[in-house]
Image (cartoon, rainbow, N blue to C red):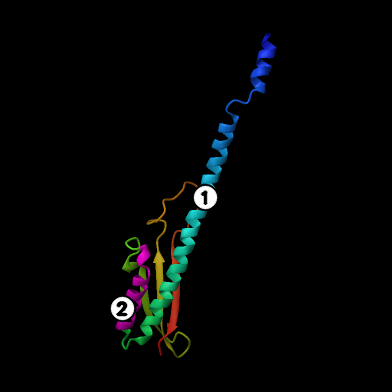
């Protein structure tokens, strides 16, 4: 066999091409899958935090003093987020009484801020942008 024919025979063979294609496609698939899981978890956490802030603000309606309203709102919101503990801490939840929130009413504003950049629940994938903080707020009229 001549040298040129041997080179053409080697080039014509496709030994290992399927393995190479699988390696390339599987890496792309895993990056997409990890992105879907990460953003799905962030979205789920955002929805849960919004619901917990609303529940905390609603629970404060039944209290008589401002201090009790703040304490009740924080505790209720924290308890509603039991799935995310111990990552989520009570200090991530703030409740403030706002006087004249709509002109004449007194309201309570519950804010939950989770620092995703410093305490990610799912490890960060290099190059995948994620939010710095996940924030949820709810305001309810007290009187």
> Can you identify the residue that label 2 sits on?
71
Is label 2 in a helix, a strand or a loop? helix
Whether 33 is drawn above or below 62: the answer is: above
Q: Where does the N terminus fall, quadrant-wise?
A: top right
Looking at marks 1 and 2 on the same chain, the residue that comes earlier in the sequence is marked by 1
Q: Identify the residue at horizontal 30%, vertical 83% (top origin).
A: 68
Q: Identify the residue at horizontal 32%, vertical 79% (top origin).
A: 72
User: Residue 123 at x, y = what percent?
Assistant: 41, 51
Q: Quadrant of residue 108?
A: bottom left
Closer-to-camera residue (75/118): 75
Question: In the image, which is nearer the foreground, mark 1 or mark 2?
Answer: 1
Q: Identify the residue at horizontal 46%, vertical 48% (top origin).
A: 125
Q: Where does the C terminus fall, quadrant-wise?
A: bottom left
Q: Identify the residue at horizontal 46%, vertical 59% (top origin).
A: 41
Closer-to-camera residue (85/57): 85
Whether 136 is drawn above or below 64: the answer is: above
Residue found at the very far top of the displayed protein: 1
Segment colored magenta = 67-84
Category of crowding for the residue at label 2, using alpha-carbon neighbours closer than 10 angstroms: few (below 14), some (14–19), many (at least 20): some
> Can you identify the residue that label 1 sits on?
33
């Amino acid at each position: 066999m001549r040298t040129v024919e041997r080179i053409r025979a080697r080039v014509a063979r496709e030994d290992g091409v399927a393995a190479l294609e699988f390696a390339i496609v599987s890496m792309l698939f895993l990056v997409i899958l990890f992105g879907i899981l990460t953003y799905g978890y962030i979205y789920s956490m955002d929805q849960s935090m919004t619901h917990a802030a609303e529940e905390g603000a609603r629970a404060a309606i039944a209290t008589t003093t401002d201090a009790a309203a703040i304490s009740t709102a924080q505790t209720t919101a924290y308890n509603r987020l039991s799935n995310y503990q111990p990552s989520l801490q009570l200090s991530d939840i703030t409740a403030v009484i706002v006087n004249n929130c709509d002109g004449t009413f007194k309201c309570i504003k519950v804010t939950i801020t989770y620092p995703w950049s410093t305490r990610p629940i799912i490890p960060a994938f290099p190059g995948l942008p994620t939010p710095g903080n996940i924030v949820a707020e709810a305001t309810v009229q007290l009187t």
